[in-house]
Image (spheres, rainbow, N blue to C red):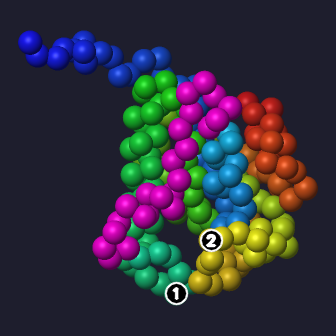
């Protein structure tokens, strides 16, 4: 007798109330905050941009200060893949929380286009450069370059976009509480 346990099973339910896009420079706390934020919902998923990049196991190119068109293409590919996952989770009633390094308006607009029609909340984590530097020094993940110049780019290009949080003096839970208080 064939197994019919998945027959007539519904995957999509009432859509989730939000899709979050948490952005900031490397070391701003995106991954930690995003994972903690997703855990606050009965059904939450953390979509980490770095992990999407890691899926490219041959020919992966990470962004660097010098122009690299292939790295830029892969950055947009990971944004598109993150949006595809977020759209699927949203339809299934799971609050999706994407985290990625987004500092340029064009990159943000690409994300917005990919997430069009979803109840998007843009969260910009903007602790001080000094705090970011301390965090990067203390963590296992080592960056090849000093990315602190991205803070200036982000503050210039994304000013007035989304909800900004200076988490310099906030704990992880306090940062998530502040994000949820703005809902």
Q: Where's residue 95, x and y in %?
A: 55, 32
Sequence order check, earlier mark of 2 and 1 = 1
- Where does label 2 land, which residue? 141
Dot 2 falls on a residue whose secondary structure is loop
Magenta residue check for 45 = yes
Residue at the limit of the structure toward the right, as seen here: 169
- Residue 123 got which mark? none
Residue 121: % across, % down: 63, 40
> For residue 122, which quarter of the picture?
top right
Residue at position x 43%, y 72% in the image: 72
Question: Going by the picture, which residue comes out furthest to the bottom?
Answer: 66
Which residue is labeled 1 in the image?
66
Residue contact at pointers 2 and 1, CB within 8 angstroms: no
Q: Gap in Å between the C-alphas at discs 2 and 1? A: 21 Å
Q: Which residues are magenta?
A: 38-60
Q: Which residue shows up at 42% across the image and 18% down it?
A: 13
Q: Would residue 76 be seen by someone viewing this image from the given angle?
A: no
In the displayed image of the protein, which residue is found farthest to the front?
Answer: 1
Quarter of the image containing the N terminus? top left
Q: Is residue 37 left or right of residue 54?
A: right
Q: Residue at x 55, y 47 (%)?
A: 98
Numbered label tally: 2
Q: Nearer the viewer, mark 2 or mark 1?
A: 2
Write the residue at 46% across / 40% down: 86
Q: Nearer the viewer, residue 116 or 181?
A: 181
Within 10 angstroms of label 1, few (less than 14), some, or many (20 or more) residues?
A: few
Residue 135 showing in the rendered view: yes
Q: Quadrant of residue 8?
A: top left
Image height of 49 relative to 38, above or below: below
Question: How far across and down, in percent of the image, does residue 33 sit?
Answer: 70, 48
């Amino acid at each position: 007798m064939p197994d019919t346990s998945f027959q007539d099973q519904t995957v999509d339910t009432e859509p989730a109330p939000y899709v979050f896009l948490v952005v900031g420079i490397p070391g701003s706390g995106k991954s930690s905050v995003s994972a903690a934020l997703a855990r606050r919902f009965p059904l939450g998923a953390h979509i980490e941009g770095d992990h999407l990049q890691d899926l490219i196991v041959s020919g992966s190119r990470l962004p660097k200060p010098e122009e690299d068109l292939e790295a830029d293409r892969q950055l947009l590919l990971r944004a598109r893949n993150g949006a595809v996952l977020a759209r699927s989770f949203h339809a299934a009633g799971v609050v999706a929380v994407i985290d990625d390094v987004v500092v340029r308006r064009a990159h943000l607009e690409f994300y917005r286009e990919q997430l069009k029609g979803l109840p998007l909340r843009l969260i910009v984590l903007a602790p001080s450069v000094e705090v970011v530097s301390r965090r990067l020094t203390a963590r296992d993940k080592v960056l090849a370059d000093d990315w602190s110049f991205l803070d200036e780019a982000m503050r210039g290009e994304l000013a007035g976009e989304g909800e900004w949080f200076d988490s310099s003096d906030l704990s992880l839970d306090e940062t998530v509480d502040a994000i949820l208080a703005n809902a």
